[in-house]
Image (cartoon, helix red, strand yellow):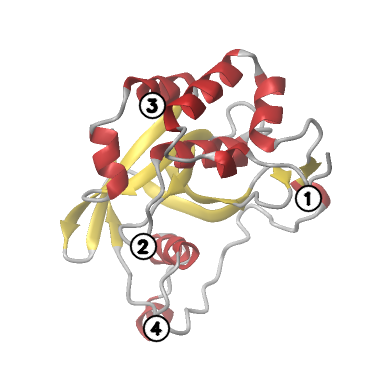
Amino acid sequence: MSNEERILFKDKITKKEYTVLVKELLNAIDMGEDVLKKFLLGCENPALYSSHGTYQEEGHDHCGGLKGNRFTEKRFCKCLYYRNGKYYNSEECRECDFADRFDITGNYRITDYEVPAYFYGKGIGEIDLIISDGKTQYATELKPYKGNEETLLRMIAEIMTYTIGYPTGKYIKAIAFFEGTKQAAEFEEAVPEIKELLTKANITVFRFEKTGEKAYKICRL
């Protein structure tokens, strides 16, 4: 099966078969890394990102601002990174058209965004954010505070897909959502299988909690 023909596990997720799919993913984890890779990616030998992309660590060092106030997850992640990182430019930020700008408080910081997955192919996106406490880097699938309906299982499957292949210890997998969202509510009422999956897949959960009109704190749950 070619990379174009394969079906990623994350794209099979439906509400109708939600619990069944959770159990299938748990079983794939139990069967080891090779089986899990094939299960998530839909093929045994996916292409490496290094053969196709040009991303370099520390390469996101300048933001020229955003034109227009159209809201997307990618734009939101970009703004979170540049507004709250070492490459913040107050003048460019003031002139930016994007209105959804927030300050991040607390011990966790955003140190990169849109980091490529280890494997490459149709349907495989980027790691939304790298969140760090100064020691550990958390590869994080983020869902914004508006405009999304994704389930926790989809978020889990995405971050597992985008990080599989990276050397052990490079990143800790994580998912993040905002308080008051559909994902926050699902987490509070999560079925036992989801909690087992988070534990078995070693996935950290973060919640963005509001601390001011335009400020959030990243809290580990």
Residue pictured at 71% horizontal, 35% vertical: 42
Q: Which residue is mark 4?
A: 97
Of mark 3 and mark 2, the one earlier in the sequence is 2
Circle number at residue 194: 3
Distance CA(mark 3)–CA(mark 1): 30 Å
Question: In this rendering, would 150 be left or right of 210?
Answer: right
Amino acid type at image mark 4: Asp
Q: Which residue is mark 2?
A: 147
Residue pictured at 73% horizontal, 47% vertical: 120
Of mark 2 and mark 4, the one earlier in the sequence is 4
Q: Secondary structure at mark 1?
A: loop
Tell me if residue 209 can be seen.
Answer: yes
Quadrant of the image containing the C terminus? top left
Q: Nearer the viewer, residue 52 or 31?
A: 31
- Asked if the residues shown at circle 2 and circle 1 are in contact, with their CB atoms under 8 angstroms apart, the answer is no
Q: Quick one: label 3, few (<14), some, or many (20+) residues within 10 Å?
A: many
Q: Quick one: label 2, few (<14), some, or many (20+) residues within 10 Å?
A: few
Distance CA(mark 3)–CA(mark 4): 39 Å
Question: In this rendering, would 58 be left or right of 202?
Answer: right
Q: Which quarter of the figure has residue 107?
A: top left
Q: Secondary structure at mark 4?
A: loop
Q: As drawn, which residue projects farthest toward the front?
A: 16
Placement of 69 over or under 167, stated as above or below: below
Q: Position of residue 159 (x, y in %)?
A: 53, 40
Tell me if residue 133 can be seen.
Answer: no
Q: Which residue is mark 1?
A: 4
